[in-house]
Image (tube, rainbow, N blue to C red):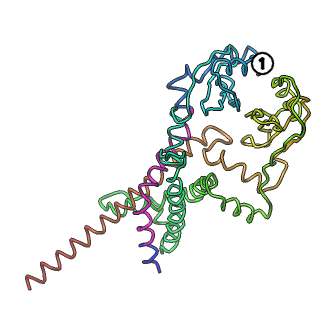
Amino acid sequence: MKTIIKKLHLIIAVFASVFIINLSLSGAILVFAKDIQYWFNPQFWLIDTEQAFDKKHLSLNRLLTHVEASTDEKVVRVDFPKQKNVAWQFQLANRETISINPFSGKILLRYRFDETFYGFVHLWHRWLLYSNKKGEHPLRDYVSVATVALMINLILGIWLWCQLKKKWKHLQPKHGGNKFLTRFSYHNLIGVVVFIPLLLVAFSGLTFHWKWPKSVVELLTFSEVLTGGNAVRSGEPANQAIDFQAAMEKAQAVLPGAIIYRVSLPNKNGHLITFRVKTDSEFHAYSKIWIEPYSLEVVKVFEAAKTTAATKIWNFRYSFHIGDFFHVSVKFLWVVIALTPLVFIYTGFSMYFIRMRKKQVVKQKRQADFVAV
């Protein structure tokens, strides 16, 4: 049984290693991709700190009018960053995005997502940068399969470690002339240390593509993942302009202390203004507020943190996957964890080739002794 598991462990690594290397490198970069983007091109993303903290931003109505007049495109969504010194992002109907200084109204950059550094790394990590003419991403299935392969190999590796007679002794780093034992000790030590966090990070990654991980969460928590659904108003639209600034202030009043993360503008008759907000009990913005665009009536409120256990765990997946929780130090730890599969691949294949060379030497020696006899 142990021999079969060892061979399976090796075979999975051989077939999935290229994809796992891509996941490891892109995942590590993605943790700080936005920060790197800000550092290298601050003129496109950052606002003067004094201006950001001392002045009040222009009204959302004025900014929307300005962006639509400057681009000849309708704005469908506005994203508000967590940091006050980062520009607001206005997404247009043609899928372009405008980075704008909300205090001066100056347009800093007009771009498409895949043209940015963050967009490049994001597409590399999830879809290996390939899209067909239909806009589909066929390689995303391969990425997900490779993620499952990584999870299986982590479990097989822990099982093999548990079969060792002196398993705790094998966690002590060994140095010296025996290269095999050195690599073997680090392979075991790192595998045991990162087993749980790396397994969970990999599983959380699957949730962004496949549906079955949601069923797993629901099964383990004996509850259902709730999203709040959608809300649609009835009746014909009024013959008047929409006061988006007043709607935003209304949303802030509904959940005091909540941070508005995104507002989706109504693009069809019957649609409401939808606000995604982050409450104090959330790591990311999953709560929603729906407001009627003309009467400014609050139609529906969904507080994600006050729902089921499955919902809370499911909504934590994004923050957990990128290490964006508790403290910035977690992000640095996540970078290290993201790079550990590279160590597994290096030490694993090194041990294999060292063992093959040793067997070859023994075989040649036996052949030489046989000829001599």
Residue 40: x and y, percent?
A: 49, 25
Q: Is residue 22 within the magenta segment?
A: yes
Residue 96: x and y, percent?
A: 60, 30
Residue interval drawn in magenta: 8-34
Near-viewer residue (248 or 183): 248
Q: Is residue 262 left or right of residue 333?
A: right
Which image quarter: residue 17?
bottom left
Residue type indicated by callout 1: Ser
Residue 69: x and y, percent?
A: 67, 18
Who's the residue at 53% across and 49% down the image? Answer: 137
Q: Is residue 3 left or right of residue 162?
A: left
| Element type at mark 1 | loop
Which image quarter: residue 352?
bottom left
Give above or below for 232 relative to 83.
below
Q: Is residue 227 left or right of residue 256?
A: left
Who's the residue at 79% across and 42% down the image? Answer: 287
Q: Is residue 66 within the magenta segment?
A: no
Q: Main secondary structure of the magenta part?
A: helix
Which image quarter: residue 274?
top right
Query: Where is the C terminus found, in terms of image quarters?
Result: bottom left
Who's the residue at 72% across and 53% down the image? Answer: 314
Quickly name the residue at label 1. 59
Q: How crowded is mark 1: few (under 14 residues within 10 Å), some or many (20 or more)?
A: some
Outermost residue on the bottom side: it is 373
